[in-house]
Image: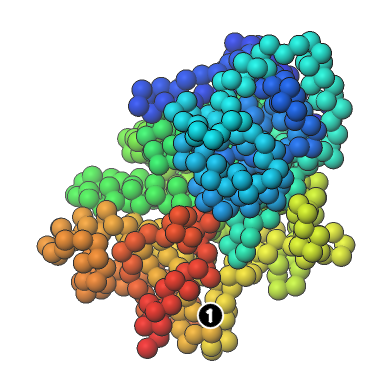
Amino acid sequence: MQNILTDLVRLQEKAYGAAREAFSVINIDAARCDATSWGEFASKVQNMACAFEILGLQPADMVAVLAPNCAEILITDFACYRNRAVPVSIYATSSPEQIKYIINDAGARFALVGTPALYRAVRSVAAECPSLEKIITVDPAIVFDAADTTSMRFSEVLELGSVASPACRADVALRAASATPDDIATLIYTSGTTGEPKGAVLTHSCFNAALDTHKSYLTMLSDSDTSVCFLPLSHIFEKAWTYFCLTIGIRVAINTDPKRIQEAIPIAKPTCMCSVPRFWEKVYTAVQDKIAGMKGVQRMLVERALKVGAKRNLEYKRLGLEVPWWLEKQYQFFDKRVFAKVRKVIGIDNGRFFPTAGAPISPAIVEFLHAIGVNIVVGYGLSETTATVSCYPAVDFIIGSVGTPLPGVQVKLGADNEILVKGPTVMRGYYNRPEENAKAFTDDGWFRTGDAGLFDLNGALVLTDRIKDLFKTSNGKYIAPQAIESRLGQDRYIEQVAVIGDQRKYVTAIIIPAFGALKDYARRKGIAFSSVEDLVENSEIKKFIAERIERLQKGLAGFEKIKKFTLLPKEFTIESGELTNTLKIKRPVINTRYADEIEAMYC
């Protein structure tokens, strides 16, 4: 088979039987997972593929996909592959202008739309999208506007495909059989922290290589595992991970509401799940909150348990060494009475493998999670590399690093310690961007990641920061803001941080507190407030946060430390333009929008 994705669903139906569960959708309100079998999945993909052919979709045509995570995304993706067409994911949090830009840049003919708000957004720009011919809606609650004569409901499209003629079905089968590794599998648009997003062209050969490599590398996982699809399927990390799960038969539980993930996980009980560090930061702060509220013997028991867990899992298991019997006995005691209860509250009673990437994560959080028996696996990857470049190996992983490169992926350092990558998972280039492609690759074909890093003595890759994010103080000292931000992000009273200091005398920060925790603290201390504005202006609160920042900065050089900070009463959001769709800070926007607050810290 030339392309893993083209016939994946049909092959899995044969391998596992039509009745076996392929994926499920987490129904949080009913506290259950609604399963779809491989047979049902294959039938819907085939019907959707035939409907696409009937509606005139041609090989290499683009289909925009704008929806929160749902089963219809997977059905559409694989129906596109059977037609040699290209699904183009657009974040459900995108603005109408962003949606218009991507539809026009890709030249999408069809658009799968998930919610009423997204339908309205697409309709509001449809007249300015000359390539767009048809909108296919998922949510039955979507009401078509009076002037809309071309949109169809997903159920109607499936019905159209279900009555397709034998000739149509044969044509789709012929298209699938004629697919080549050089076909475009998808365009993944970059988050655009410093400019317009660019569509990374990922071919089927990229996915072939990524999936084959992961199958040989992640041998600890099997078709007895369950994963939660939590990150947006428009994110290459989740898309590639979900495809990997389907490839080896891991059951995928789709979470449709990211704001309720803490409720969804205990229902699905995943043994594995990819996520970004912010998820684990929230888990860490929640557990630390519980520990902080403990007293006497209970607190002593937990603190002792953490010491035993750290010694067993970090000093022995991590290094592949045999655990002394006396330490193992202690660990089993504490695992049953402490750690198992914590994991059950999180919803990962039987958790085995939890890859995380996308942003820096504090080594303290990694150590804590491993101590309580959560196998968090830190990695590094980009949209342009079909996700994973490196990750922790099973043993001898170095905390503070992003692991070692995967087999077949070459990594070296270029000028300014920029991480350069070459291999079969690297994109073809940016869609219709010859000038950007010239900048993105070296003359001998290495992809410039834009990230700075180094290799330690063990060969592990350590990220230092985004090269574009690095700045120099007026004293000539280089600062890596993400490293400082990740330190502060582990604090339960701090929600978001933007470090400032380019060409300034010293480093400052704009901080968004975790308002729930801060309100609780204020009540305990008898600090009067009637609004979050009152809290961020309160001198006692500022002193409290300053003390916590000082502790978190222990070990940093003096020139790296935050000297002043400003507390803001409102979070950075995607809607306000301060965050990208992947929740990265847009530093130029922050610097402009809060120029007065920043200047005040340097007076």
Callout count: 1
- The answer to which image quadrant residue 33 occupies is top left
Q: How is the image coloured?
A: rainbow
Is residue 211 visible to us here?
yes
Please identify the residue farthest to the front as the structure is shown: 147
Q: Work out whether residue 342 or residue 124 is closer to the camera in this orientation and state it.
A: 124
Residue at image point 57% right, 40% down: 66
- Residue at 47 percent of width and 25 percent of height: 140
Q: Amino acid at mark 1?
A: Asp
Q: Is residue 272 visible?
A: no
500 or 212, which is in the foreground?
A: 500
Work out whether residue 231 or residue 521 is closer to the camera in this orientation and state it. Answer: 231
Side of 133 where 228 appears, left or right: left
In this picture, residue 543 sits left or right of residue 188: left
Image quarter of the N terminus: top right
Task: Please give left or right for residue 375 compared with residue 450 in the image.
Answer: left
- Percent from the top left, x then y, of residue 255? 47, 33
Q: Quadrant of residue 174?
A: top right
Q: Position of residue 422 (x, y in %)?
A: 80, 54
Mark 1: few, some, or many residues within 10 Å (few <14, many ≥20)?
Answer: some
Q: From this view, report whether residue 388 is shown above or below residue 34.
A: below
Question: Above or below — where is 575 with respect to 593?
Answer: above
Which residue is more in the foreground, 573 or 346?
573
- The percent coordinates of residue 338 (x first, y second) are 33, 38
Q: Residue at x 65, y 67 (%)?
A: 452
Element marked by disc 1: loop
Residue plotted at (60% across, 44% down): 126
Q: Check disc 1 and report the residue beneath it.
A: 502
Quarter of the picture containing the C terminus is bottom left
